[in-house]
Image: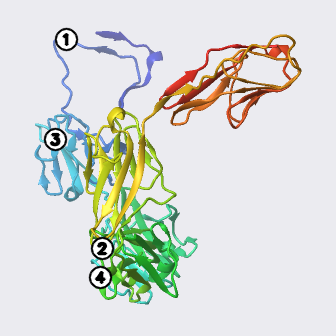
Amino acid sequence: MTLDVTDADAGKYTCQAENVMGSAQSSVEVSRPVVVTTTASTPTTPAPTSARIVRISDPPVVANRQIVASVGYNMPVEPVLRWNVRIDCVTENADAIGWIGPDGELTSRGRRRVLANGSLIIDGIPRGYAGDYQCVATDTRGGRDTESITLKILRPPTLKKPTPSSAVRPVPDNDRIFTIGQRAEIVEGRSVDVNFTVTDRDSDEYTVKWKLPDGSFLSQGETKDNVAVSASTRFLKISNTKPSDNGDYQVIVTNNAGSNEASTRLQVFTEPMVVTKIEDTALLNGEPFTSDEGVFNADEGDTVSLEFTTSGSPPPDVMWKRGSDILTSGDDVFISTSKGPYETTSTIAFRKLDAADSGTYSAEADNGEGTVASSSVEIDVRAQEDVRILRAPSTTRPVVTSSSVSAIIGQDDLLVLRNQRVEIDCAAAGTPTPVIEWRRDGGPLPRGAQTIDGNLHIAEFQPTRQGGTYTCTADNSVTSDTEQIKINVPVRPQIVPRTEPTPTTGRLPDADVTGYAGHAIKMVEGRRLTIDVEATGTPTPSIKWRLPSGDRIGRGQSVGRASVLANDSLVISDTQPSDNGPYRPIASNAAGLAKVKARDFLK
């Protein structure tokens, strides 16, 4: 190709090439007109160029636990332990790309892989892979270029594990120092220091926060109440300790790679103290138990409950004794204990006292702090030979659900529905032990009723054959005792009819009138009308009156001049013609309801 060049074309010409990796250029000087001819038959061959690594100084890119960098970045690349790493090596004119790591020439093996484009991949970089990595680019003409990059692996701080601490009882009465992770035990009023140590040599730069049991945080030099963090953050000091300081104290150490944490549980010890004495809470057969000149007197067969409350930190254990004998739960003795943060309440209950139960009863509280708190009472159980049925306290009521009725002999009569389960307890005291027998209406128990452990059981109550009065008899061949309980069957309400009065003839008397439900009533205006009603049924039905207006009122209620008395009678004061209409009583109970046919009240 021929170019026509004139004097005006003289000067310096530059060719420049650019891409994302950089730029290159070349220049030529034209000083006078020349003719440049390129002949296809005599091509020009450029001089060969050696392999070259393109240095890229861009900072690494971090995303999704992976870091990507290129050789040419002149600072250490800092992946976090177990992250994925990719180091790119961009080259020109290279026929081969290799890598040399801290431990020699690398191949695609294990966690490290060299891709076809020359990038080095390290999956989940472990601790031993830190160091210098060198990319080597070569060509077949003997050209060679290298570039290095340094990997520094970051790790979260590691806290030194403490030497296990053994419990010492009682806890020494002095200030104490603990390493984080140990259980810190201190006597109330003393001070405690908690420290930690970071063991990793590459964790010199880190921040520290202390988390308190209430969820708040303290940092360097900060204080909250009696808790303070040292200026170095290495120590947490709790001064003048008290039980409310109990809980977990946590240190959180953080660097660029993450966090590590450990905690110490503080227990402040206080000696046991008596909160409630036994004599202040004793119960006899469910009622307050009072002493007679310091002695609590009871009869054989009585039930007694003793309660003792103590405080301390940790909350004390409680042991019950009769004299020097340790007591445990058994057939006739039940011990229950509940613990709070600083208090323990323990109860011992005797289902049936025996003369052999007489003695001094004590409760002892101990939490290992050397001092035992105690309280005691003396109980005298009087022997009694007369048989005595243990009747239900007057304040108790039968337990009724949709499927069952449970009662204790001595309670009020029962109302039982068809197919309900019935259980009636009958227990008795006496020496020798009495035998329990049940009868119904003076005869044997009906079919489906049976005695189990002295108690009456009916699996599915049938009103037509199992209602009636049941008698429990306790007999020990010396004396006996009986008690009855009636099982009532629901009866549908009925309103008792009355004979229709003789109709009034002639002029109506100017007087108040008393009538009966269901009868027509005539009277003069302005007088008081009383309408009586009587209903039967089991249980006793309740009565409401339906007024001509549609309102319903019951005992003690009123609408306008109409009201219902305590005996369920309806009263209308100062009668008016507007009061005309039907007044209907409605009686209802668990078995159903009854109504009276409406009759007009006439003037």
Report which residue position mark 1 lands on: 40
496 and 547: which is toward the camera: 496
Q: Residues within 10 Å of mark 3 (few under 14, many from 20)?
A: many
Determine the secondary structure under disc 3. Answer: strand
Separation of marks 1 and 3 at Cα, in angstroms: 43 Å
Point out the tag, 1 or 3, that comes first from the N-terminus.
Answer: 1
**Rendering quarter of residue 580:** top right
Q: Are marks 2 and 4 in contact (CB under 8 Å)?
A: no
Which one is closest to the eye, mark 3 or mark 4?
A: 4
Percent from the top left, x then y, of residue 413? 46, 47
Q: Earlier in the sequence, mark 2 or mark 4?
A: 4
Amino acid at the residue labelled 1: Ala
The percent position of residue 16, horizontal first and vertical second, equals 38, 27
Callout 2: 10 Å neighbours few (<14), some, many (20+)?
A: some
Q: What residue is pinned by disc 2?
A: 431
* For residue 138, side relative to residue 284 (left or right): left
Q: Disc 3 designates what residue?
A: 114
